Image: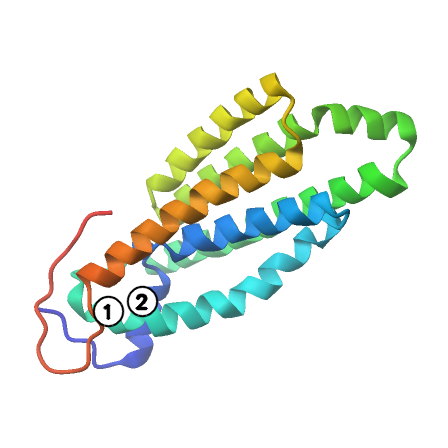
Amino acid sequence: MIAFDDAREMQRRASMYYGDGLLDIGIGIGLLFIGFAMIFGFGALAGIYPALILPVAKSAKRSITAPRMHHLDFMPEPDAESRMRRSRAVVAVTLAVLLAIGVLALLMSRMMPARIAVGLRANALVIIGSLLAALFIAIAWGSSTKRLRGYAGIAVLVLVCGYWFGLSTAWYLMIIGSIVGANGAVVLSRFIRDYPRFYGGNGKAYQRSF
């Protein structure tokens, strides 16, 4: 049995736990946001998404994940400081990729010479798809979450199919976002079902593999 008397310690562990599906939902909504923004000509707004989602994600961790950590036999890696550095690196990479996508959309539509813009448009799906797959791999490494590697494989598969059928970049992002977000919702629903909120007293600690 694990007792969490320190609320800060409980929240710290919750922030390093990725079996609740919140990471997946955040990424999925972000890709949908970018896709819709591209369709309506506001692709450069992609870079503001992390600033919008981070406070929401922290609040969700506090209200959804932290009260259920009492049930989990979850211990952060012994090298917690190294894990935190990896998490910060993942956030930095995520911001860089989203900004790159937004800048690419802006340059292709307004600021870049026509010849270069045409070349970028012709290969935009491959460029963004490759960046997205690399992002999933980076997040999987930073969070030690295996299912993120599966998302990288899905991103490549949809990229190949999309390139073959002439799928637009915006629709590609929205398809991947829908898949990732939907799977995250399934993981979250299982997490909430299997681990009810802890209101005090003694709770049995057990471990579930995600």
Q: In this view, does 102 lie above or below 122?
A: below
Can you tell which mark lies on residue 68? 1
- The residue located at (44%, 31%) in the rendering is 154
In contact (CB < 8 Å): disc 2 and disc 1: yes
Q: In this view, does 12 lie above or below 207?
A: below
List the residue tagged with mark 2: 65
Q: What is the distance, in whole Å, between disc 2 and disc 1 at their CAs?
A: 5 Å
**85 sits left or right of 69 in the view:** right
Q: Is residue 206 above or below residue 102?
A: below
Q: What element carries label 1?
A: helix
Quadrant of the image occupied by residue 165 = top right
As shown in the figure, which amino acid type bears the numbered disc 1? Arg
- The residue located at (59%, 59%) in the rendering is 50
**39 sits left or right of 116 in the view:** left
As shown in the figure, which amino acid type bears the numbered disc 2? Thr
Q: Is residue 71 above or below residue 35?
A: below
- Residue 79: image x %, image y %? 31, 56
